Image: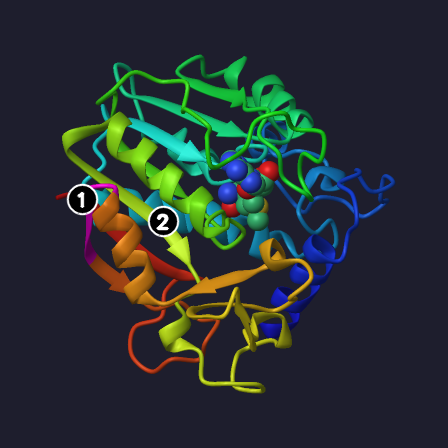
Amino acid sequence: MARFFKKSFNSIFKLKTREHKPPTSKPKGWLSEEDEQFTPERSFWQNPEEPISHYYRWIWEYLAYLPLLCDVKRDSRILEIGCHHGRTSRGLLQYIRSPGLYRGFDVEASQVAEATRRITHQAPNFQYLHADVYNRHYNPSGTIKASQFVFPFEAQSFDCVYAASVFTHLLPDEILNYFRETHRVLTLAGKVLFSFFILDFYKGPGTSVSPDYEFDHPYENDPGIAVKYSEHPDSVIAYSRERIEEYAKAAELRIVRVIPGLWSNSPGTAVNEQDLIVFERG
Ligand SMILES: C[S@@+](CC[C@H](N)C(=O)[O-])C[C@H]1O[C@@H](n2cnc3c(N)ncnc32)[C@H](O)[C@@H]1O
């Protein structure tokens, strides 16, 4: 398991620019005809070398989390922040039925185009939008600051908002804005699921499942925020529960559940690779 994480992080964080890797001769995996259609070529994956089991794990996990942790029903309206090429939305295709719908947005145009080509053409209630928001890795020519981005949706239009491995790359003012925008687009009874690296669970060098999950450098002298690479804090960033609660409070959200992830080797429940936090309005 640790080996997958290491490979995956090496491929994500050590790239200077986001370019698709050269085509690989490795097959995606032994997929059914339907899965083959919905799964992009490996050159689109975060880590083109990863086993198909790891790629799919995220798909089925989010299909389980959203109904179980966020009361997502078959007719729910769902927003995914940082949808990439629609990996985690793939499982929802078999669950969400009209008038239920899925919307995802991402800063990387080529990934959004791939999701649209493969998924929206067959499932029109699943739509993927490009947000021209700056990100050093994923959209270095982006024109909008994440700290100022207004989600392109009406107020209270989603029953659930989720993000998988996105807040692990966002800086404090970006998180605060995304929390506020989440609150704006969320229905009154809506639920939110965001993954984080919660700094409270980190026990020091050599204790995590991979050296890629080590947070030994404080960010801007704040003991509640730490990064792996000081020079590139957005490569991978961890927040204390206290900081996350502060941002949530400022955005009129509140934490209702925290489920530790596998990354930190924490005792007790560990479900996803990252820590999961469920929020409600409040
Ligand atoms: C580690 S990937 C996770 C992708 C996807 N959630 C998944 O699990 O397959 C991080 C994603 O966040 C997107 N991203 C980065 N900054 C963003 C921002 N400010 N707003 C929306 N998406 C962003 C990236 O383009 C990338 O697709």
Residue 132 visible in the displayed image: yes
The residue to which callout 1 is attached is 280
Q: Secondary structure at mark 1?
A: strand
At a point 58% along the width and 87% down the height, the residue shown is 206
Q: How many discs mark residues in the rendered view?
A: 2
The residue to which callout 2 is attached is 194
Q: CA distance from mark 1 to mark 2?
A: 11 Å
Residue sticking out furthest to the front: 221
Left or right? Give the position of 281 relative to 123: left
Q: Nearer the viewer, residue 238 or 120?
A: 238
- Asked if 9 appears above or below 134 in the picture, the reply is below
What amino acid type is highlighted by mark number 2?
Answer: Phe
Residue 239, given in percent of the width and then of the height, sits at 41, 63
What amino acid type is highlighted by mark number 1?
Answer: Glu
Q: Quadrant holding ligand 1?
A: top right
Q: Which of the two discs, 1 and 2, labels the residue nearer the N terminus?
A: 2
Q: Main secondary structure of the magenta part?
A: strand
At a point 72% along the width and 36% down the height, the residue shown is 41
- Asked if 85 appears above or below 31 in the picture, the reply is above
Task: Report the span colored magenta.
Answer: 251-256
How many residues crowd mark 2 within 10 Å: few (<14), some (14–19), many (20+)?
many
